[in-house]
Image (cartoon, rainbow, N blue to C red):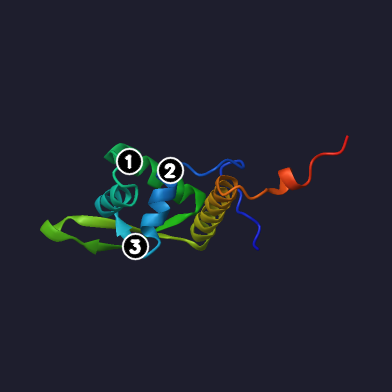
Amino acid sequence: MNEPVEVQNGQPMTETTYFILLSLRPGPGHGYAIMKEVQKLSQRRVTLSTGTLYGALKRLLEQGWIERVDDLAAENGRERKDYRLTQAGQAALDGEIERLNGLLTAAGQQVAGKPNVLQSNPPRG
């Protein structure tokens, strides 16, 4: 098993960051498409304003988790900036998915009544 990627000083990834990165996993996307995909992936729990999205994209660019790809000509002659995951962004996303899977596994075992490591190995003292 790979070492989990430590993000944001060892803290879990925010939902906004998680869903933005997840929305870019299949391939590049522009701002409006990212906003719509985040809303869809989060089952409408996360709705990004333009300011929140572009602030997050700026931070993710600075962290090296995403990068701009060549601007594509959009409808109405307006330029559109597309973004895609970098290898570092993919590693961060994979680490967060692994962390979340670990949480779900522990919860599933607890609900099913299976002992976890702490229950099966009580502290000595």
Q: Quadrant of residue 58?
A: top left
Instruction: Tell me what residue is drawn at x 29 percent, y 53 percent.
Output: 37
Q: Position of residue 93 (x, y in %)?
A: 50, 55
On residue 15, which mark appears? 2
Q: Position of residue 94 (x, y in %)?
A: 52, 58
Gap between marks 1 and 3 measured at Cα: 23 Å
Instruction: Tell me what residue is drawn at x 47 percent, y 61 percent.
Output: 86
State the residue in front, 119 or 66: 119
Looking at the picture, which amino acid does disc 1 mark? Arg
Q: Report helix, strand or loop for mark 2.
A: helix
On residue 28, which mark appears? 3
Near mark 1 (Cα within 10 A), the count class, few <14, some 14-19 or many ≥20, is few
State the residue in front, 114 or 91: 114
Q: Are marks 2 and 1 in contact (CB under 8 Å)?
A: yes
**In which quadrant will I find the C terminus?**
top right
Residue bearing the label numbered 1: 45
Near mark 3 (Cα within 10 A), the count class, few <14, some 14-19 or many ≥20, is some
Gap between marks 2 and 3 measured at Cα: 19 Å
Q: Position of residue 38 (x, y in %)?
A: 32, 49
